[in-house]
Every structure is written in C-alpha cells, then in structure tokens.
Image: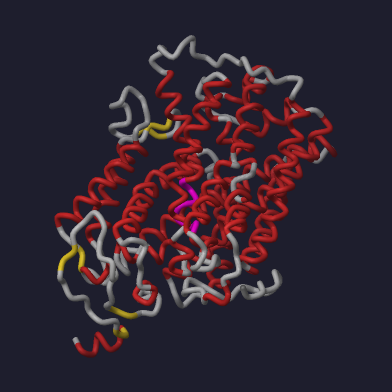
Amino acid sequence: MAEAPSITEIETYGVERIPDADRTARPLDLFRVAFGGANTFATCVLGAFPILFGLSFWQGVAATLLGLVVGALLLAPLSVFGPTNGTNNAISSSAHLGVHGRIVGSFLSLLTAIAFFSISVWSSGDALVGGAARLAGLPENELSYAAAYAVFAALILTVCVYGFRFMLFVNKIAVAAASALFILGVFAFAGDFDPSYPGTFASTADPMFWPSFIGAALIVLSNPVSFGAFLGDWSRYIPASTPRKRVMIAAFCSQIATVLPFFFGLTTASIIATKAAPYLDLAAPNYVGGLLAIAPTWYFLPVCLIALIGGMSTGTTSLYGTGLDFASVFPKFTRVRATVFIGTLSIIFIFIGRFAANLTASISTFATLIITCTAPWMVIMILGYVTRRGWYDPEALQVFNRRQRGGRYWFTHGWNWRGISAWLVAALTAVLFTNIPGQFVGPFGEIAGGIDISLPLGLALAALLYLGLLSAFPEPRAVYGPAGPRLVRAAETPVPPIVDADRALAEA
C-alpha cells in the first residue's frame, strides 16, 4: 500500500475517481470518521428525545437501541460505493438516477450537511459558553455566543480546506477524547441517576405511548441515516480490493458505537426531568442548559472540552461533504474553492439563523424532513447495487463532471426516470405522513393514530416502486455488466457512446 500523504498537504482530489495508488485508508479510518462525526453534543440532544416524549428510562433504552440498529443496518450498505467506484455516493448514484439525475443525491447531501453543520456549531457553541460562564464567569451574552460560533466555524473551515487526511487526524483524537469525557460523566451524574425513572405514561396501553415510542426511535434512526448521502466521501479512499464485508462492518459499528453519546443524553435527560424539569419543556427544550444546571462544578471543564472536540468533529465531517458535493455539481469549482464558498455561506447562515431569524428551533425540523427524503434515495441506491451485482462503469459515472454525453448511464437525456420517479413519489409521500410532535405534522400525519410512519412508509414505497419499475420497464443490459442483472429483467437496448458535449452539439 502506498504511503499516506502528510495531513498538512492540501487535498487536491474532487469527485473524480481516486487512483488506486492513492487509496491508503482502512475500514478503521471510516469507523473513526463516521463515529467521530456523531460522538458529540448534537447526538446527546437526540438521545434526550425519548425522555422529552414522556418515555421511562428503560423504554427510552429500548427505543434508542431499536432506532440505532435499524439505522445502522440501513446505512452500512452505503459504504461500499466509495471503494467500488473511488468517488462519492452522489456520483455513484448516476448509475441509478442518470448522469443528470445524480444531482438529487448532491443536493440532499448538501442540505443535510449544512443543517447538521449548523446544529453542531449552535449546540457546541452554547455548551462551550454555558460551561465557561459557570467555570470562569464568562458573560452569557450575544457577543460571547458570536465569538464561540466564529471560533468553531473558522477552525472547522480550516480543517476542511486541508481535506480528508487532516479531518481523519482530528477524528482520531476526537473519538478517544470525547469518549473518555462522556465516560467521565458516569462519575459526575452517578449519584443523581435513577434507572427507575417512570416517564409520564402509566402503561403501554396509554393511547400516546406507541406514537411517542415510535417517534423517539425514528429520531434516533435519523442520525445514522443522515450519513447516507455522503458516506462515500470518506470510504472512497479505501482500496477497491478491500472486502466489502469489512467496510460495511466498519460503517455499522460506527453507528452502534454512538450508543455512548445517545445513552449519555438519555441518562442525563432523565436526571434533568427530575431535578430541572423546565429545561425539558417539549415546546422549547434546552438540553444543554439543563445539563449544566445538574452538573457538578468540576464537570464544567469536561463539558467545554466535549463541546470543542465534538463540534470540530461533527462540523468537519459535515462541511467536508458539503464542499465536495458542491464541486461535483459545479465542476468548474475545485474542492478547495467549493469548500471555502459553501463554508462561508454556511457561516453566514449560522449567524443570521441564530441572531436575526431565530432558526435554531426550525433547523431541527428542516434536518428531519431532509432525512425523510434521503431515506428513499438510500433504498434505491442499495437495491441498485444488488440488481447490478456491485458492478459499475467508473468512466460512465464521470460523464456529467467532464461535460460529456452518452454512456451506460445516459438513459433518457441523462435522466433515469425509473429511479427518479420511485424516489420522488416515496419522498413526497413520506413528507405527507410525517408527524413530529410540536414541530411538523403533514396533511396525513395523524392517519396512524399519531404514530409517525413517514420513514417506514418512504422506505417500503421506494423499494416496491423501484423494483416494480425495473421489472416493468427493463434497463439496458449494458448497465449490468458481464454477469447480467439480479432480480430484474434487462432489455437489449443499445447505449450511446460517450462523446464531448461540444461534439454532440455540433453533430446535432
């Protein structure tokens, strides 16, 4: 294996296929980046939702484990596209949505990354300022918050400009340090923790219990799903010869490991509900404020460190993917220029959203809806991989980026209406059935007795529609490679050769 470049060497690769000689990452590196990006206060906030929804501690444990396992199982297959094609998942989706239709994946990952970058900076900045206020008397005013946000944003942008290696270095430190600080929390809160915390439901027969339980599990599930669109940003540096099973196990375990911050959030939320209940008002929850209210003085410094380390980790994994995907949609941008451009816009959004428009509450709803739309896209990608037997044409995947036309994935003027239609119908239907208590309820959100069925419905509908369309309207045999299709039929339809766009226009 080739020697990895220095972390201070600015990454020059965009979304073009990474040469085999430069793929020096391991599945363990994928684990570190994916786990590090979720081992933060933002995940702790998600971990508090079972208590916010009225579940007991043990019911919250069950909902958390259910959401984590299902989400990790859904995410794991998305890790194989990077090693297979040497590019990110949005580019790989060209094989299933068309060379133009792959912009769906790019914009989903773009919006998801901006949303989670904002959540990361806000939650970590709030924790840092709050901890510093109690530890050193720092005033909790807008200037302090603005300074914290600015420091986070500048550090994150710097790491992302340097690229994957620097981000991997940050996450190597973050995984160990943040985990140790969360474990230290066991000693900080052990005296106040009561595992028999009863919640607000007298029994599971309460008509609101199952909507709350399913809602909490789906919120937990949304965390692994949020990585789906840009998991290939990191796995593309893994050699193509690496067994796919090892790559998927790394991705799966990276999400199962987030049981640490999830349980930290769940445990401390149960203490907050007992000792400082106003902080868990569902209409305006303030988990970070509640955590600081119940924490012993000596734990304020670890809180600040978790905020700093975790904010860096989540922010870099989000913004790196954002810059990379923007460069893939607008190939004239280099990865560095795209990262700086999108990073600057994201920072402006963070300040406007926090101080001018008060978007800190609505951004969580926005992130949830984006994930609701991303899940059907993930199903199409997974089923596409299965039907293709994992075979792809790397050159045909790059047609859009090279401003060319034709190739195996040209389909209908660059759009594969089978995949696009399945995604669009499934995503819109899922949004219509969304039911996020206190945040967003779709027109049909109450149809299942208040239970949020948006994600299960979107996943199932995407699978049925996509496989149905592939069977009813077969794709060209050329897209399946020498082994032919699996589960579906193929058509003897010729595919146009790859030509430069200028040549195609001249011939037309």
Residue 337 lies in quadrant: bottom right
Q: Position of residue 276 (x, y in %)?
A: 67, 21
Query: Can residue 147 be seen in this snapshot?
Result: yes
Q: Up-down: is 501 above or below 121?
A: below
Q: Is residue 508 above or below residue 103?
A: below
Give the residue furthest to the top.
Answer: 202
Which residue is at the front of the view, 242 or 273?
Answer: 242
Q: In the image shown, does 293 or 500 lie closer to the viewer?
A: 500
Q: Is residue 374 above or below residue 447?
A: below
Q: Residue at x 78, y 29 (%)?
A: 187
Q: Determine the residue positioned at 65% across, 66% down.
A: 165
Choose between 36 and 505: the one closer to the eye.
Answer: 36
Q: Which quadrant of the figure contains the N terminus?
A: bottom right
Residue 226 inside the magenta-drawn segment: yes
Residue 467: x %, y % from top left: 23, 51
Please count the marks in the image.
0
Question: Residue at 37% of width from left, 72% of height from top?
Answer: 397
Query: Which region shows up in magenta?
Result: 225-231
- Quadrant placement of the C terminus: bottom left
Can residue 347 be seen in the rendering of this structure?
A: no
Identify which residue, 81 or 153, lies in the foreground: 81
- Answer left or right for 507 relative to 197: left
Q: Is residue 183 magenta?
A: no
Above or below residue 210? Residue 381 is below
Residue 319's spot in the image, x, y percent? Answer: 57, 59
Q: Give the residue at x 65% y 17%.
A: 274
